[in-house]
């Protein structure tokens, strides 16, 4: 027989199960930000490491960044049904910089400013309803360590 | 948090700048950064940013969307990794 206590336990567990998927999506992606390799970050965010390289993902940055604490970047994707845009720095200890989730009303575009410690490659992954796409761009930092 | 939402034809451009950390939020020791920024329109989240410490300390973020009118409201909210948060409503100009 289902005791009262058992019923309450079961009921609250079902409630937790109902709430979990939403929270999992809404919570800050701490595991992906902690990941210390590109592949580990990709797996956390996309459950995949295989992307299609495309020029339809456009990355606009200064070729040479003047202020390494605020390097401006603009990303746009000429692709349908874009769900998210994610930015990575290729050789950073924890490569994930940011991930932006877009709604159907949001245009596939985002602009932000990032910190860089050295010349590196910016990797962008765009998730559409169908596929994962990627593009990359090298950003050079002006060398401030000339001894003067 | 400074927000500018401007409609041009049918496209609304939203630009956000968060001066961070302010003196009252500054803490000694652990690294502080803004973790999340969201924008809601008519009860729906139209933009959700998860940010890590590589994003500029005072984040600037811009995005755009369709389907709203001049005079409509947008609700923005950010939170950092220390439990600070701020909400602000803006009107599309």
Image (cartoon, rainbow, N blue to C red):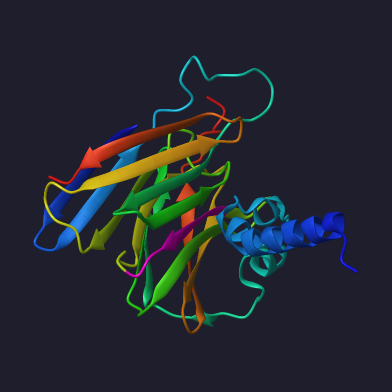
Evaluate whether residue A92 shows in this view. no
Report the residue at 83% width, 57% height from top.
A4
Q: Position of residue A130 (x, y in %)?
A: 48, 84
Residue interval drawn in magenta: A97-104
Q: Main secondary structure of the magenta part?
A: strand
Instruction: Say whether residue A108 is magenta.
Output: no
At 32% across and 76% down in the image, what residue appears? A78
Residue A71, quarter of picture: top left
Residue sticking out furthest to the right: A1
Left or right of A10, for residue B8: left
Return the x and y of residue B24 as percentages of the image width and height.
Answer: 50, 15
x and y percentages locating residue B36 in the rendered image:
50, 44
Asked whether A98 falls inside the magenta stretch, the response is: yes
- Residue at the spot 55% in from the left edge and 44% down from the top edge: B54
Picture quadrant where residue A25 is located: bottom right
As rendered, which of A145 and A56 lies closer to the eye?
A56
Compare residues B48 and A24 and report the one nearer the observer: A24
The one of B90 and A52 positioned closer to us in this rendering: B90
Q: Is residue A46 above or below residue A25?
A: below
| Observer-nearest of A3 and A91 | A3
Side of A46 relative to A17 (left or right): left
């Amino acid at each position: 027989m289902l005791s009262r206590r058992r019923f309450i336990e079961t009921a609250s567990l079902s409630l937790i199960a109902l709430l979990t998927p939403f929270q999992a999506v809404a919570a800050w992606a701490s595991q992906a930000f902690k990941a210390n390799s590109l592949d580990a970050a990709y797996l956390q965010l996309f459950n995949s490491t295989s992307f299609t390289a495309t020029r339809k993902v456009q990355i606009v940055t200064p070729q040479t960044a003047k202020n390494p604490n605020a390097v401006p970047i603009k990303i746009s994707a000429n692709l349908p049904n874009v769900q998210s845009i994610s930015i990575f720095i290729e050789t950073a200890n924890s490569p994930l910089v940011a991930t932006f989730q877009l709604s159907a009303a949001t245009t596939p575009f985002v602009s932000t400013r990032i910190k860089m410690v050295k010349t590196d490659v910016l990797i962008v992954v765009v998730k559409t309803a169908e596929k994962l796409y990627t593009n990359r761009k090298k950003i050079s930092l002006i060398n401030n360590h000339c001894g003067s | 948090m400074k927000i500018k939402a401007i409609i041009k034809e049918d496209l609304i451009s939203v630009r956000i700048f968060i001066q961070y950390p302010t003196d009252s939020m500054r803490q000694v020791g652990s690294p502080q950064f803004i973790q999340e920024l969201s924008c809601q329109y008519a009860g729906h989240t139209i933009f959700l940013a998860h940010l890590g410490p590589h994003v500029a300390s005072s984040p600037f973020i811009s995005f755009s969307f369709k389907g709203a009118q001049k005079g409509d409201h947008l609700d923005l909210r950010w939170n950092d990794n220390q439990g600070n948060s701020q909400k602000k409503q803006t009107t599309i100009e």
